[in-house]
Amino acid sequence: MIAEIGVNHNGSLELALQMIAAAVDAGADVVKLQTFSAEALTTRSAQKASYQVDRTGDGSQQDMLRSLQLSLEDHVRLMDECEARGVDFLSSPFDVASVDALIRLGVAEIKIASGEITNLPLLRRVGAVGLPVLLSTGMSTMDEVEAALAALAASALDRSLITLLHCTSEYPAPPEDVNLRAMVSMRERFGLPVGYSDHTDGTTIAVAAVALGARVIEKHFTLDRTMEGPDHAASLEPDRFAAMVRGIRVVERALGDGNKGPTAGELKTMRVARKSIVAARDIAAGEIFNEDNLTTKRPGTGLSPMMWDGVIGTVATRNYGADELIEL
């Protein structure tokens, strides 16, 4: 369970610290941020996405991102806070220098954002590091995912260290655009564990992804969806995030091991819910069992009705009263 703070800290270390505490209380296993330099990430002329314009107004993407970036000193403080609270720290680097910065800080894993899946220099640098990788696949075709995996592997990254995250890069993503079955298709094609980075409203799709086999769920997290900033409106507040975690934990328990068989509770129910072969009327010793003098009724503590054909035509060895369980 990844609480994606992303840039919802609005460039404030204090707000980021508050968000870590709230994410831990809401049941997150991992707190994720974004590591970037606005100048390295965008050109001066790069335009904002339409959803960013809706939520932050006109202006350059670079100016917006500059106000949202954190210093490396901030990263150290946030990593220490995560460690103190028993939650893992994760971040997405958006340029090679940011990859190197995260490595110097001692991160244990790297998340590659959907927008970087075609950034070959970044892929090669991440692959050369040899750390576990979460590869987000929003906006990607299967061939692009395969090319990114090849780039990571060519840089000596063990494929077994990669988890693929299905994602729909819309904010919010309409349910009809989610295509959760694509997550299953990636697992089957690439033989790698999969997860889901969720940009839909609410919690339903994330819970469904777990039922389909997601090993990782990432969800944008905020203290207040009405705060100023590009991603707050597409995020979950702590109470909703906690509800999602509870739902997912229930689904995890419900998935089981895949082996079909009666549970301990069902074994008790079987005795009262299944049926046995019983006498349909009084039967005298020496009488031949047939479909007129036998029937099936509860409880299921006697001969199973699946033995019906083996009982028909045999001889009663004693007298039976109506409704008495038949014995062989």
Image: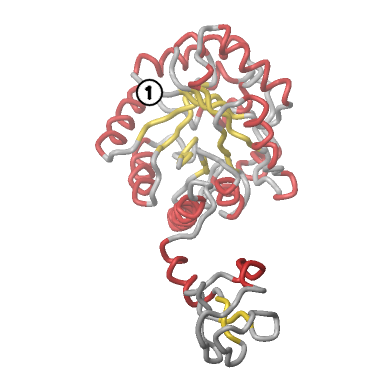
Q: Position of residue 53 (x, y in %)?
A: 67, 40
Residue 224 seen in the figure: no
The three-letter code of the residue at mark 1 reads Ala
Q: Residue under circle 1? A: 108
The answer to whether residue 100 is above or below residue 248 is above
Which quadrant is the N terminus positioned in? top left
Q: Residues within 10 Å of mark 1 (few under 14, many from 20)?
A: few
Residue drawn at 48 percent across, 29 percent down: 34
Give the farthest residue toward the front. 286
State the image coordinates of residue 50 (x, y, percent, origin top left).
71, 39
Q: How many marks?
A: 1
Residue 192, horizontal then vertical, whole percent? 57, 27
| Residue drawn where x is 51% and y is 7% of the image | 156
- Residue at 58% x, 39% y is 196
158, above or below 16, in the image = above
- What percent of the width, then of the height, locates residue 204? 59, 55
User: Would residue 286 be visible to someone looking at this image?
Assistant: yes
- Given residues 71 and 33, the one toward you in this image is 33
Residue nearest the viewer, comparing 178 with 96: 178
Quadrant in which residue 289 is drawn: bottom right
User: Quick one: which residue is furthest to the left in this view?
Assistant: 84
Task: Indicate the secondary structure of the residue bearing disc 1.
Answer: loop
Identity of the residue drawn at 35% across and 14% down? 104
Specify the color scheme: secondary structure
